Image (cartoon, rainbow, N blue to C red):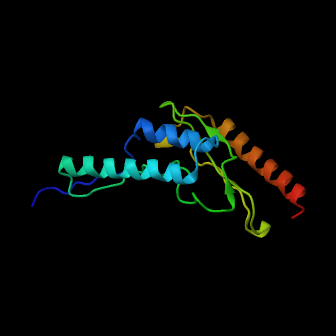
Amino acid sequence: MPLPTEPIGSIPRPTELLAAMSAYTTGGISREQLHASENAALRETSARFERTGSPVISDGEQTKPSFATYSPSGLSNLAAAGVVIPFADGHPRQLTTLTAGPVESLGTTDDCGFSPFADETSTTRDTAFAKVKSRVEGTLMASNILKV
């Protein structure tokens, strides 16, 4: 039996889909037009995967807005109004914000990425704890504004 292999993760999107995603974000095309572009990218991605001989065919995450936000994507109580995270690949990712929901369910957390891959030098402990303190202070400010 050969070693198992399967694709994990995303495949770069075709330029046509990137343009459609950008146009949809700015109101230049309708949701239906975006879905048509997404479906075309999905068909083309699946066909290319099949041609590789891969035993597993993936959608390549073509329609996912971001690795950071695709699980809640499409929910009616979320908006693309959060922090924009620039990445070196030139593809920024924007976090979502909650627009409606029970205030009792709100909470905050730290990014926990202060020392990736046991890198203990790129972020100092002082910086990490300053970020934690900022989160605590921001949460208190939000609690006061929301009166919870």
Residue displayed at 36% across by 54% down: 59
Where residue 104 sits, quadrant-wise, is bottom right
What residue is rendered at 56% in x and 39% in y?
22
Say whether residue 32 is left or right of residue 48. Answer: right
The residue drawn where x is 87% and y is 59% is 146
- Residue 123 figure quarter: top right
Q: Is residue 9 left or right of residue 110?
A: left
Is 58 on the left-hand or right-hand side of 72? left
Q: Quadrant of the C terminus?
A: bottom right
Residue 10 seen in this snapshot: yes
Of 108 and 132, nearer the camera is 108
Residue beneath the point at 38% across and 49% down: 40
Looking at the picture, does residue 28 appear above or below residue 141? Answer: above
Give the image location of residue 27, x and y in percent: 64, 43
Residue 32 x, y percent position in the rendering: 53, 54
**Any part of residue 67 in sight:** no
Q: Nearer the viewer, residue 23 or 140?
A: 23
Residue 17 locus on image (x, y percent)? 45, 42
Left or right of residue 33, residue 12 in this image:
left
Q: Position of residue 25 (x, y in %)?
A: 61, 43
Count the numbered circles shown: 0
User: Eyeballing the image, is 105 above or below 45?
Assistant: below
Quarter in which the N terminus is drawn: bottom left
